[in-house]
Image (cartoon, rainbow, N blue to C red):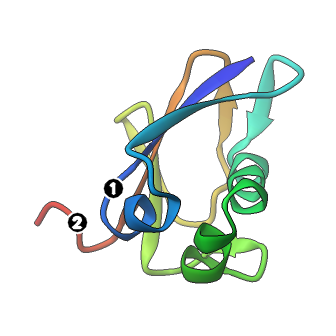
Amino acid sequence: MKIKIEYYGIPRQRVGLASEILEFDGEQMGIHDVILAISNRHPEFQQHCMDGTRIDKNFTVNLNGDRFYQEDDGVAHDGDSLLILSMDAGG
């Protein structure tokens, strides 16, 4: 399955990309597992945007522009988009 990851604010600065497509086995994947895959792929993201194995409280994840996850407890499916942004972005 393919998931589009879009980065905004500090996550974009740390990853160095506006977006990327990640591929995973299976038909769905927990958002927490997607975040872990991103942190393994991008050490700067791990260092500045993670608190251990969880996304730092200063960042949030949005699934398909509909729902926000701070605890990364949702499920992503093939073709979904995850937006990772600073909590103060936009305002």
| In the foreground, 50 or 31 | 50
Query: Residue 19 at what x, y percent from top left?
Result: 44, 38
CA distance for labels 1 and 2: 8 Å
Question: On the picture, is 4 further left or further right than 78?
Answer: left
Picture layout, residue 32 above or below residue 2: below
- Report the amino acid beneath label 2: Ala
Q: Are marks 1 and 2 in contact (CB under 8 Å)?
A: yes
Which quarter of the image is occupied by the N terminus? top right
Image coords of residue 45 (percent x, y): 59, 68
In the figure, 78 relative to 64: above or below? Answer: above
In screen coordinates, is 87 left or right of 2? left
Which quarter of the rendered picture does the C terminus lie within? bottom left
* Residue under the point 15% across and 60% down: 90
Kind of residue indicated by mark 1: Tyr
Q: Residue at x 67, y 16 (%)?
A: 78
x, y percent for residue 40: 78, 60
Write the residue at 53% across / 34% down: 20
Of all residues shown, which one is farthest toward the right? 25
* Residue at numbered disc 1: 8
Mark 2 or mark 1, which is nearer the start of the sequence? 1
How many C-alpha atoms fall within 10 Å of the one at disc 1: few (<14), some, or many (≥20)?
A: some
What residue appears at the point 35 percent right and 35 percent down from the top-left corner?
A: 65
Q: Quadrant of residue 30?
A: top right
Q: Which residue is mark 2?
A: 89
